[in-house]
Image (tube, rainbow, N blue to C red):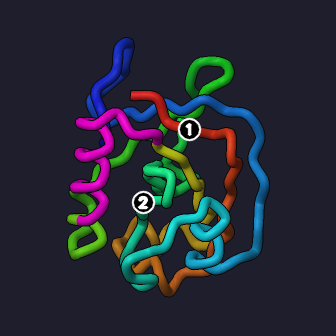
Amino acid sequence: MIARQAPSKSDNDLQVDLDELTMVGLGIKEAFARYGACLRNVQWSVSAWAPDGSLVVSLWEHHRREGLRGTLEFAASANRWKGPGNTEFRNSVAKAFECGARVLLMIVHAEEVARVEAGEDGSKIKKLFLFATTLSVKF
C-alpha cells in the first residue's frame, strides 16, 4: 500500500514499530493535533504534515495483520477509495518516502467495519483514534 520493504509478504504491506497505543475519543482534527498536524480538510484528509516535517497518516485498524514481534503490519489498497483525500495521501506518502521524512501513525478503529469496506464515506462512520508519539513507520 505505501512502500516496498524487505522482507515483505506483498507490495501492499506496511510495517511499523510498536511502542504503546492510547485510544482517544477525539474527532479527527483533534487527534491529528495531538501530533501537531493540521488537516487540510477534515472531511477527506487522512494524512497531514506536522510542523517538524513529520508526516502523520491514519490507517484503519481492521487492515492490521499479524506481523513480526514488536511490529504492526497493514495490508490494504489505496485503490479502494477515490477523491482528494486519496490523492493527498498518495502524494504525501510518496514525498515522505523520497525525502526520508519521519512518518507517524494514527490507527483508526471503526465501529462499523462493513460500512468502511463497502466504500461509504469514512467521515460519517463512528470511530476512535489510537495513537502514540513514539510509533513511527519504517520504510
Q: Position of residue 135 (x, y in %)?
A: 63, 40
Q: Is residue 101 magenta?
A: yes
Amino acid type shown at disc 2 = Trp
| Nearer the camera: disc 2 or disc 1 | 2
| Above/below status of 96 relative to 123 | above
In terms of sequence position, does the residue under pointer 2 or pointer 1 come before the other? 2
Q: Position of residue 69 (x, y in %)?
A: 66, 18
Residue at 46%, 29% in the rendered image: 138
Q: Nearer the viewer, residue 130 or 60?
A: 130
Q: Quadrant of the N terminus?
A: top left
Q: Is residue 46 left or right of residue 3?
A: right
Residue at 42%, 66% in the rendered image: 46
Question: How many numbered marks does the figure carry?
Answer: 2
Read off the residue under disc 1.
Answer: 136
Q: Would you say residue 58 is visible in this rendering?
A: no
Amino acid type shown at disc 1 = Ser
Q: Is residue 78 left or right of residue 139?
A: left
- Magenta stretch: helix, strand or loop mostly: helix
Read off the residue under disc 2.
Answer: 49
Range shown magenta:
88-102
Residue at 53%, 36% in the rendered image: 65
Disc number for residue 40:
none
Q: Is residue 38 magenta?
A: no
Q: Nearer the viewer, residue 133 or 67?
A: 133
| Above/below status of 72 relative to 45 | above
